[in-house]
Image (spheres, rainbow, N blue to C red):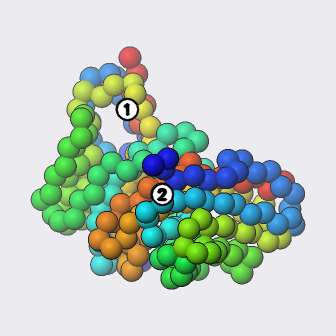
Amino acid sequence: DTGVSQNPRHKITKRGQNVTFRCDPISEHNRLYWYRQTLGQGPEFLTYFQNEAQLEKSRLLSDRFSAERPKGSFSTLEIQRTEQGDSAMYLCASSFGQGEEKLFFGSGTQLSVL
Amino acid sequence: EDQVTQSPEALRLQEGESSSLNCSYTVSGLRGLFWYRQDPGKGPEFLFTLYSAGEEKEKERLKATLTKKESFLHITAPKPEDSATYLCACGWGGGNKLTFGTGTQLKVEL
């Protein structure tokens, strides 16, 4: 068990470009979450999956954001036409679900939009 | 609106000087009160989950307690390696989503 893995660790992009992040959860976990954290704030919920189904999206998640979890394994988060306000740490977490409530977080992808 | 408020924002302690961090919450349908530790540049690391008022949990120098409106994280005889940001979060709704507070940044000095 290597924990939740996120790639890349850092991403610098220019405004208007598209970016994609990847998350590999703990293998036996069926729930996967995406959170966003800005400096001095706690993480904010964006979306979550139960296996391959995306069950909920926060109203924080604009139409420029899309997340997938094909086959219920790894997940990707894509941001289209990035804006400077998208600069943040994007955190992925996973859990067993089904009564096991605690979330295990990855180290995040730090996005800087110039 | 659901809210999680942590205090103080920052705390500086001498090694061995015990103290407490506070987390007050207004969340409907609470499904657990969580404490996480976060080191710079890393994701939050799970510490405790509390489910009902009166519940207490301990781990090394840390002890978490829960009432109907707030939770405390007590740190006994802290060491420099306890320096980190401590985040409180409330679980709610289907899928147990978490609403986090802004954290308490703890610095323990020799």
Mark 2 neighbour class, 10 Å CA radius: few under 14, some 14 to 19, many 20 or more: many
- Circle 1 crowding by C-alpha within 10 Å: few under 14, some 14–19, many from 20: some
Which residue is painted at 41% across and 36% down in the image? B106
Q: Secondary structure at mark 2?
A: loop
- Residue B3, image x, y percentages: 40, 68
Find residue B54 and report its image quarter: bottom left
Residue in the image at 67% along x and 52% along y: A7
Q: Is residue B64 left or right of residue A78?
A: left
User: Residue A96 is drawn in which quadrant?
Assistant: bottom left
Tell me the residue at 72%/81% (across/down).
A63
The tag on residue A103 is none
Front-most of B51 and A98?
A98
In the figure, is residue B74 to the left or right of A74?
Answer: left
Circle 1 chain:
B
In the picture, residue B19 is in which quadrant? top left
Q: Position of residue A101 (x, y in %)?
A: 33, 65
Relative placement, left or right, of A16 versus B11 is right
Callouts 1 and 2 on one subunit: no
Q: Taking A78 as reference, is B71 above or below it?
A: above
Above or below, B24 relative to B64: below
**Label 2: which residue?**
A26
- Residue B105: x and y in percent read 45, 40
Q: State the residue at coordinates (41%, 60%).
A: A103
Which residue in the structure is indicated by mark 1? B82
Label 2 marks a residue whose chain is: A
Q: Can residue B75 be seen?
A: yes
Task: Measure how far apart labels 1 and 2 are at the Cα level.
Answer: 26 Å
Q: Amino acid at mark 2?
A: Ile
